[in-house]
Amino acid sequence: MSSTPGADKKVLAGVLGILIGGLGVHRFVLGDAGGGLLRILITVITCGAGSLIGLIEGIIYLTKSDEEFVATYIDGDKKWF
C-alpha cells in the first residue's frame, strides 16, 4: 500500500490513459469530469487521433514518482500533460 494519499490512482489512471485514453476514462478516475468529456470530444472531432493525448498522459503518469503525481494531478489539479 502506498504511503502517499492519492497515489493509488496513478497506475490505474496511467494504464487507462494508455489503453483507452481517447475515452477520457483516466481523467474521470482523477476526478476531472470536464477533462474526461473534453478528451471524448477531441477524439470524436479528430476521428480518433485525439486519443494520442491520453496515451501521452498515461505514460507521463506512470513515469512520475508517487509524490510528484499526487502534487501535480491530485493536489495541483493539472488538466493537461
Image (cartoon, helix red, strand yellow):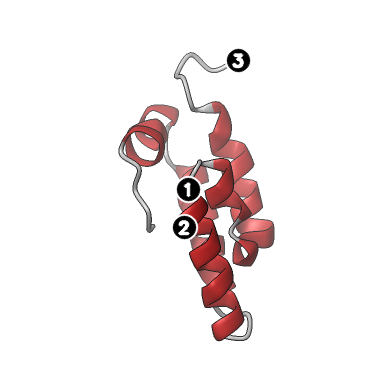
- Amino acid type of the residue tagged 3 in the rendering: Met
- Classify 10 Å Cα crowding around label 2: few (below 14), some (14-19), many (20 and above): some
Please report the residue visible at 64 percent of the width from the left and 48 percent of the height from the top: 15
In terms of secondary structure, where does tag 2 sit?
Answer: helix
The quadrant of the rendering that contains the N terminus is top right
Question: Looking at the image, which is closer to me, 46 or 8?
Answer: 46
Name the residue that disc number 3 marks.
1
Spot occupied by residue 46 in the image (x, y as percentages of width and height): 55, 85
In terms of secondary structure, where does tag 1 sit?
Answer: loop
46 to 79, vertically: above or below: below
- Amino acid type of the residue tagged 1 in the rendering: Asp
Spot occupied by residue 18 in the image (x, y as percentages of width and height): 62, 57
- Amino acid type of the residue tagged 2 in the rendering: Gly
Q: CA distance from mark 3 to mark 2?
A: 28 Å
Q: CA distance from mark 3 to mark 1?
A: 24 Å
- Classify 10 Å Cα crowding around label 3: few (below 14), some (14-19), many (20 and above): few
Name the residue that disc number 2 marks.
35
* Foreground disc of the pair 3, 2: 2
43 to 46, vertically: above or below: above
64 to 47, vertically: above or below: above
Q: Is residue 32 left or right of residue 16?
A: left
- Classify 10 Å Cα crowding around label 1: few (below 14), some (14-19), many (20 and above): some
52 to 37, vertically: above or below: below
Q: CA distance from mark 2 to mark 1?
A: 5 Å
In terms of secondary structure, where does tag 3 sit?
Answer: loop
Name the residue that disc number 1 marks.
32
Please report the residue visible at 63 percent of the width from the left and 80 percent of the height from the top: 48
* Foreground disc of the pair 3, 1: 1
Please report the residue visible at 40 percent of the width from the left and 35 percent of the height from the top: 74
